[in-house]
Image (tube, rainbow, N blue to C red):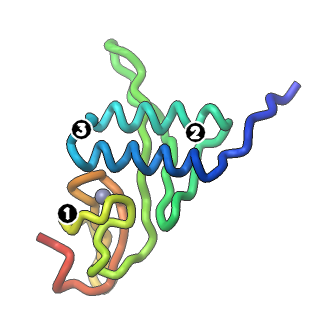
Amino acid sequence: MATVHPFPNQSVRALVHSVIQMYAAGKWTRQQMMSQVHDTLRQYGISRLNINNYNVRIVEPVITSAGVFPVVIIEGGEVSASIGCPACHSREAGYLAGDSTVTVMCRSCGCIYQFRERKEGLK
Ligand SMILES: [Zn+2]
């Protein structure tokens, strides 16, 4: 018999968003953030959630002798460089790939996103 999960409403998005802000502000560790987002999404039986202009997605966990560690990817679409990270609004990002459209990873929250303007946005 299929499990019926509650519908992930706006308060779930607000919770996940605030967890990412806590991590970006250095108040939570990356693993605390990923575990909380993972557990929250799993409560609703989902592996992906759209939050405003970015997504969180559960991927394969890291399995070590110390335990199983959930892994969550934060992905934004293409943004204006003046906005910065779509998840935490940090302007500090590390280059990953690309030329005319640059793919970067936010240094504060780990969100992967793209932008076109090359002059600003990177430090
Ligand atoms: Zn960020």
Q: Name which residue type carries label 1.
A: Gly
The residue where tag 2 is placed is 41
In the image, residue 81 lies at what x, y percent? 28, 79
- Above or below 87: residue 7: above
Residue at point 63%, 32% (across, down):
43
- Choose between 65 and 52: the one closer to the eye: 52
- Above or below 1: residue 71: below
Q: Nearer the viewer, mark 2 or mark 1?
A: 2
Residue at point 57%, 39% (across, down):
41
Q: Answer yes or no: do the residues labelled 1 and 3 have beta carbons within 8 Å?
A: no
Query: What is the number of the mark on residue 27?
Result: 3
Query: What is the number of the mark on residue 94?
Result: 1
Q: Secondary structure at mark 2?
A: helix
Q: Quadrant of the N terminus?
A: top right
Q: Secondary structure at mark 1?
A: strand
Q: Secondary structure at mark 3?
A: loop
Query: What is the number of the mark on residue 48?
Result: none
Q: Is mark 3 within 8 Å of ligand 1?
A: no
Q: Name which residue type carries label 3.
A: Lys
Q: Of the two numbered discs 2 and 3 on the same chain, state the one appearing first in sequence.
A: 3
- Above or below 120: residue 20: above
Q: Nearer the viewer, mark 2 or mark 3?
A: 3
